[in-house]
Image (cartoon, grey):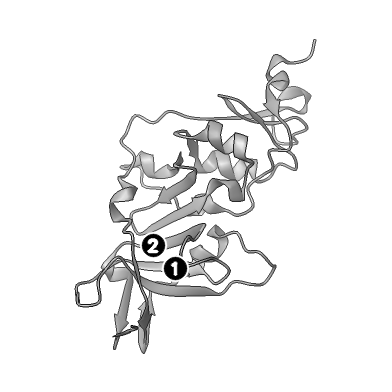
Amino acid sequence: MKNKKENIAEYNAGKPKSKFWGACGKDDLRPSFSFVKIMDGKLWATDAHLLLVQDANLHWGENVVKNLEGKYLHMETLAKMNLEKNLHYIHGEGFLAPCSSLGEKGGRMYYYHEEISAEFPKVKSVIKPTLTDVTIEAISVNLTLLNRVKNLFVWPLKGVTQVRIYRHGKKKNEDSVSPLIIIPTSESLENPRQYCIFMQAHDYELTNLKLQS
């Protein structure tokens, strides 16, 4: 008899197109940081230094994203999913790799949603409605974080990895430190599908700023 789970699977769900789970944290004292949350159709992942916000439909179809809303996927689960050649989505449960080389007898491998007992970080609290465009004469950035960003984004063309750098959410007459936002040059500034925010002031410094009018 055909596996019942396969009867409710959405085929051609596709595997992740970037290693976005690399934005997650590995701190045992903050286990919720090890998960990616799907919220408002977007992927949210953070380690308290770097926050990734990315449209989930860059990876999966509309119906899959709708069913993933409010769910959590562990970073290790996503890393294993990325090794699969073919993934289907099982509504309400997770992903199925029907011809897996990674595990279960018969070639099948299941990747389930998970529940988390710890509170997920309040990531929306750092999102502001405005971007402040600036001319930067000097910038210092934590290169470890910047190097991680490259693998988090979905790039339209191989080898195209240029980004724009902005201050985030501050008005022109405000001199206080504000988060730094990194957006691929391929994205619309009005409604970017993916971006990263450097959340800790000690991870970057912008000097000799001149705000553009």
Would residue 94 appear left or right of 133 to someone viewing this image?
right
Indicate the quadrant where residue 88 lies. Answer: top right
Would residue 25 appear left or right of 77 to someone viewing this image?
left
Q: Position of residue 81 (x, y in %)?
A: 63, 41
Instruction: Indicate the secondary structure of the residue bearing disc 2.
Output: strand
Does residue 113 lie above or below 4 as drawn?
Answer: below
Q: Which residue is mark 1?
A: 182
Towards the viewer: 178 or 133: 133
Identity of the residue drawn at 50% across and 43% down: 75
Do the residues bearing badges 2 and 1 touch, measured as CB atoms within 8 Å? yes
| Label 2 crowd bin: few (<14), some (14–19), many (20+), radius 10 Å | many
Q: Position of residue 169 (x, y in %)?
A: 30, 65
Towards the viewer: 26 or 61: 61
Would residue 98 appear left or right of 155 to someone viewing this image?
right
Picture quarter with the N terminus: top right
Picture quarter with the C terminus: bottom left
Identity of the residue drawn at 69% across and 26% down: 9
Towards the viewer: 27 or 172: 172
Instruction: Indicate the secondary structure of the residue bearing disc 1.
Output: strand
What numbered label is drawn on residue 197?
Answer: 2
Q: How many marks?
A: 2
Q: Position of residue 91 (x, y in %)?
A: 60, 25
Identity of the residue drawn at 50% across and 64% down: 149
Give the distance between the C-alpha atoms of the residues marked 2 and 1, in whole angstroms.
Answer: 6 Å
Give the residue type at disc 2.
Answer: Ile
